[in-house]
Image (cartoon, helix red, strand yellow):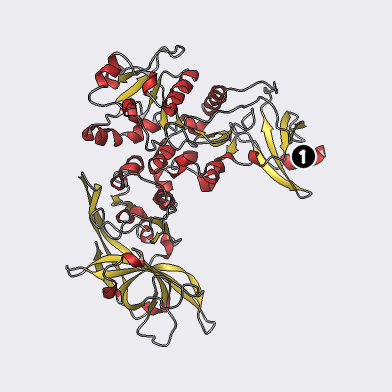
């Protein structure tokens, strides 16, 4: 009934600039309630993508948070693709920042998958760069995804677009190094970023949609009074369509090609505004909300905690790091694909630059000083693509996730529960033509240490107690069951010195919870790093992590000072 709708609606105050979208279950039917702009009337006519994106851009300009979202400053990318005149079908040409100084330059950036079939003639090189500036870039040289991005940018009335294949010299290592380091400025200063989410390569192009300016078949439009004290009339769409729920979750449920690309992670987080060309809809993200094109009024969804980007909702880099945001981001990043392993840090280097707070925090080989020691609580995992991974000790210290070629996950252990004192942490960055970015570094800390026996599993894999990397046993309690589960950094089959790991030194990291023992007693448990000695006295390398270790095993262990390398 209308009274029921009004009662539900009165629970939710309006947010300035964000249309309210809420859902309730009534008589076992899930209903979605969405506020509708008073100026919108359904026409039933086709609705071009450019009209929808233009509407989003204008509405985003009214968001207080979004007006201050560009942290790239007034910098202009070294090169841009010039589409002038934007209303003509002439070939675009390359333009240089040196010719644009003193001008206001709005531009669009493109985020996309290269795939394996990027045409050589589409790339800008030291050979053709001058011709592309003087004579232009033949549209026939560009693959469909790039052409579609240029066509939409023109339809938006924006003169410039940045595309890496065209704006970075593809045969110059020095130019690539220089320009890749500036990507945080490129994406953060863009008017918006177009993301070819559903396209696996450049031949796919943008999906072709048929949007109509009308209500959906499972929706009804109602006019209600805002409240008993507020006589203003509000228009509400009541729908049974779950697609109206929250648009910011669509990307992570769709698993489209771009969402598995390593480089695209920082492009998403650094861009103040992103338009995703998904398989069946457009999805919008900005610092204030999300929207989708399934319905013509494009209702705005509030940001969801699980999908927040680094600087969304006005968050600072300190808020992000201290809220365990860095660990969540790295966990997601480690599951994405990189064509070249040497790009492991290159692909998030711009995020690191954007988060850096000189004098307030310290970046240490993939970690932040303020996030230690809890960010050491990671474990190796099989990647979604089935690659078992392994460690590359030449890339980073063993305590850093950067040293791993596999997916990783972090244990949920708060800083307050840490039993480790970080005394000092240092790292140096080097650039290697084979490895890419390489870190050398160490962490000096004070913690309790204890030796455990590592017993590998001998039971059948079908056993419910099967654990592939084995268990830890406390030699001081020979009659007690296994003290904890071992997670080796390298898969069992890749460990070449397993014979030397029959006894491991464990460093107590922090309390993680509790566990029942075989005699039904409940004991506090801790998370521990598994270490092996190096040739240098007092220096240890990480070989794994242990979970659910009985905390009382460390009762007799005296604190020690050691160095992790």
Q: What residue sits 43% from the left and 79% below the top?
A: 482
> Image check: 257 left or right of 298?
left
In the picture as drawn, the residue positioned furthest to the bottom comes out as 479
Q: In this view of the protein, can residue 352 be seen by the observer?
A: no
Residue 498 against residue 80 in the figure, above or below: below
Rendered residue at 34%/30% (across/down): 164
Q: Is residue 155 left or right of residue 349?
A: right
Residue 430 placed where, x, y %? Answer: 21, 47
Q: Is residue 450 visible?
A: yes
In this image, 370 relative to 61: left or right?
Answer: left
The residue to which callout 1 is attached is 5
The residue shown at (58%, 28%) is 209
The residue lying toward the viewer, choosing from 17 and 126, is 126
Image location of residue 264, percent across then percent down: 41, 39
Q: Could you classify mark 1 by the number of other residues whose Cα lies within 10 Å: few (under 14), some (14-19), or many (20 or more)? A: some
Instruction: Spot the residue most to the left.
Output: 536
Q: Is residue 314 above or below residue 335?
A: above
- Report the quarter where the N terminus lies: top right
Where's residue 170, x and y in %?
A: 27, 31
Decide which of 77, 407 is in the foreground and name it.
407
- In terms of image quadrants, where is residue 76? top left
Please state if 336 lies on the left or on the right of 443 as rendered. Answer: right
């Amino acid at each position: 009934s209308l009274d029921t709708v009004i009662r539900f609606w009165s629970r939710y105050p309006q947010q300035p600039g964000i249309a309210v979208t809420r859902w309730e279950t009534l008589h076992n039917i899930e209903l979605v309630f969405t506020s509708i702009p008073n100026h919108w009337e359904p026409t039933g006519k086709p609705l071009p993508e450019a009209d929808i994106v233009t509407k989003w851009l204008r509405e985003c300009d009214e968001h207080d948070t979004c007006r201050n979202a560009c942290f790239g400053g007034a910098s202009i990318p070294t090169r841009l693709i010039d589409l002038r005149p934007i209303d003509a079908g002439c070939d675009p040409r390359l333009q240089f920042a040196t010719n644009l100084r003193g001008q206001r330059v709005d531009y669009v950036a493109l985020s996309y998958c290269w795939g394996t079939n990027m045409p050589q003639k589409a790339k800008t090189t030291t050979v053709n760069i001058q011709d592309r500036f003087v004579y232009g870039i033949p549209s026939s040289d560009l693959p469909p995804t790039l052409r579609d991005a240029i066509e939409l940018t023109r339809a938006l009335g924006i003169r410039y677009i940045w595309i890496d294949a065209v704006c970075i010299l593809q045969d110059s290592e020095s130019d690539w190094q220089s320009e890749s380091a500036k990507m945080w400025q490129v994406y953060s200063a863009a008017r918006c970023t177009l993301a070819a989410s559903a396209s696996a390569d450049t031949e796919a192009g943008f999906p072709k949609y048929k949007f109509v300016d009308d209500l959906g078949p499972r929706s009804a439009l109602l006019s209600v009074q805002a409240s008993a004290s507020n006589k203003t009339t509000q228009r509400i769409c009541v729908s049974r369509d779950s697609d109206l729920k929250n648009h910011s979750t669509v990307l992570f449920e769709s698993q489209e090609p771009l969402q598995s690309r390593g480089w695209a992670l920082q492009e998403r987080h650094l861009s103040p505004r992103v338009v995703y060309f998904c398989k069946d809809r457009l999805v919008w993200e900005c610092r204030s909300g999300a929207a989708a094109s399934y319905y013509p009024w494009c209702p705005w969804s509030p940001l969801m905690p699980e999908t927040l980007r680094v600087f969304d909702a006005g968050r600072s880099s300190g808020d992000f790091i201290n809220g365990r945001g860095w660990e969540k981001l790295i966990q997601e990043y480690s599951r994405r694909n990189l064509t070249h392993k040497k790009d492991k840090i290159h692909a998030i280097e711009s995020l690191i630059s954007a988060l850096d707070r000189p004098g307030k925090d310290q970046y240490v080989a993939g970690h932040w000083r303020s996030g230690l020691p809890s960010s050491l609580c990671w474990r190796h995992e099989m990647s979604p693509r089935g690659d078992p991974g392994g460690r590359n000790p030449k890339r980073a210290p063993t305590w850093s996730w950067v040293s791993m070629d596999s997916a990783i996950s972090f244990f949920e252990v708060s800083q307050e529960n840490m039993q480790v004192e970080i005394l000092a942490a240092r790292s140096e960055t080097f650039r290697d033509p084979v490895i890419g970015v390489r870190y050398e570094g160490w962490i000096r800390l004070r913690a309790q240490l204890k030796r455990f026996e590592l017993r590998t599993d001998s039971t059948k894999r079908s056993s419910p107690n099967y654990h592939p990397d084995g268990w830890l046993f406390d030699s001081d309690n020979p009659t007690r069951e296994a003290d904890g589960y071992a997670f080796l950094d390298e898969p069992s089959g890749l460990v070449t010195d397993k014979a030397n790991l029959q006894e491991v030194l464990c460093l107590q990291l922090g309390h993680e919870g509790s566990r029942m023992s075989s005699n039904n007693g409940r004991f506090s448990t801790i998370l521990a790093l598994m270490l092996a000695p190096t040739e240098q006295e007092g220096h240890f390398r990480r070989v794994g992590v242990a979970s659910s270790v009985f905390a009382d095993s460390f009762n007799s262990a005296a604190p020690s000072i050691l160095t992790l390398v």
